[in-house]
Amino acid sequence: MFKKILVANRGEIALRVIRACHELGISTVAVYSTADELSLHVRFADEAVCIGPPDSQSSYLNIPSIMSAAEITDSDAIHPGYGFLAENPEFAQVCEDNEFTFIGPTAEIIQAMGKKAEAKKTMKKAGVPVIPGSDGIVKDAATARKLSETIGYPVMLKASAGGGGKGMRIVHKPMEMEHAFNMASTESLKAFNNGDLYLEKFMENPHHIEIQVVADMYGNIIQLGERDCSIQRRHQKLIEESPSPVLNDELREKMGRMAILGAEYIQYRGVGTVEFLLGDDGQFFFMEMNTRIQVEHPVTEMVIGIDLLKMQINMAAGEKCPDYLKSIKLRGHAIECRINAEDPEKNFMPSPKLIESFHAPGGTGVRVDTHVYAGYQIPPYYDSLIMKIIVHADDRPSAINRMQRTLEETIIEGPETTIPFHQAIMRDKNFREGNFSTAFLDTFEFPVRT
């Protein structure tokens, strides 16, 4: 087992990793920018190293600074969390070259799944169903238009190196293609330093389902159920739950089997998610694979009773997948709400302010993952996520009611937050009945205060 792990991230996920390490008896090193000096992940780590100024390029994306911090603290492993360098194959390779264990898959696997067009081709070879579309990168708008006429409109242009909804455009008719192609390519180049695009048939109102997989170094791969991540705004997930309200046992088993098939084909190791789009007709298609721990991993933990971070660390240290995982059953229902420092009444404008008063909710079946506290100044330089509230109950209606109660108990004074928005969704009849898709927020009316 590792003696010391450096956590190459910030915020709630850095604190989450530190807690898992401490429960395993592993010392931790936090890295931080000057803007994060007072963050809780810095306070609760055994050691902390400042790696640069506030901007991400000079700190959390600065590979030489992070490697230097690992060397001077005698760390033997590096955990990337999610975001920043978590899916950067260069970072994984640098860790390996400098004899630090990268807690994640190999650089080759990250590279293969990181380029979405190549990932799709790979999964197609593995026998996993993929969305009809281009067989790799589309070189220009004319080629995209010709292909679209074959598979039928509407289509979706997607950044090959993308994620988080950037570099994506829906095209409904041929005359829109050139403008959409140029806009998506430019946005992708700016966000990922790569303007390559691929094209897919656009699925109308699907569910976004992801399957959690865990894999050791010895070829053992197990799936631990699904999460429904269909409540999204601009392709950014807001609410996740497990199990999905739209899957039956047969479909759940089939999707899990396809996730394992894909992971086996690429010889995956560690924790990861295979993501699918599910249509009303029961057909599902591979969308992408995330080669890291997910923001929404707590909902899976709540319904299976397993600490995925500890599992990830153990397998990176060479342990095998325990046999009991094969017989794990989903228990009850879990829901996660991502609480952002944003004003939903002003088009989700960021609200990086001082938290004047803070009260975390509690009670049976309630979990809060956060790095903030009363007196904490939310920095304006990073993602606006400040808290994840997760609840667990015997069934979905009870979980929704528990989340309603939990949101009511949560007090964050100073910044505007998305708590009122989540409360409105929990009250919504369609959401409560499971009648929703990735297009849910297109017609959802958030009641603005007067």
Image (spheres, rainbow, N blue to C red):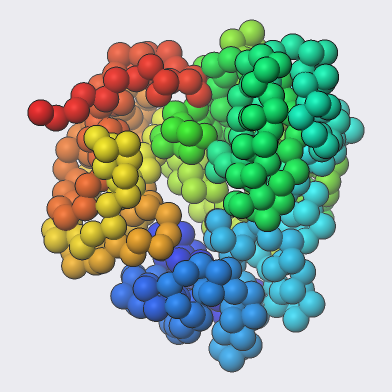
Q: Residue at x 42, y 60 (%)?
A: 382
Q: Is 205 rendered above or below residue 200?
A: above
| Image location (x, y in percent) of residue 199 | 74, 29
Corner quadrant of residue 106? bottom right
Q: Nearer the viewer, residue 161 or 210?
A: 161
Q: Is 372 rendered above or below residue 221?
A: below
Left/right placement of residue 235 relative to residue 279 reads left
Q: Residue at x 44, y 28 (%)?
A: 231
Of the 4 image quadrants, the one containing the C terminus is top left
Q: Residue at x 19, y 28 (%)?
A: 448
Q: Nearer the viewer, residue 306 or 373?
A: 373
Q: Is residue 320 visible?
A: no
| Image location (x, y in percent) of residue 146 | 83, 19
Of the 4 image quadrants, the one containing the N terminus is bottom right
Q: Nearer the viewer, residue 64 or 308?
A: 64
Q: Is 282 rendered above or below residue 418?
A: above
**Residue farthest left in this picture:** 450
| Image location (x, y in percent) of residue 38 | 31, 75
Q: Is residue 103 visible?
A: yes
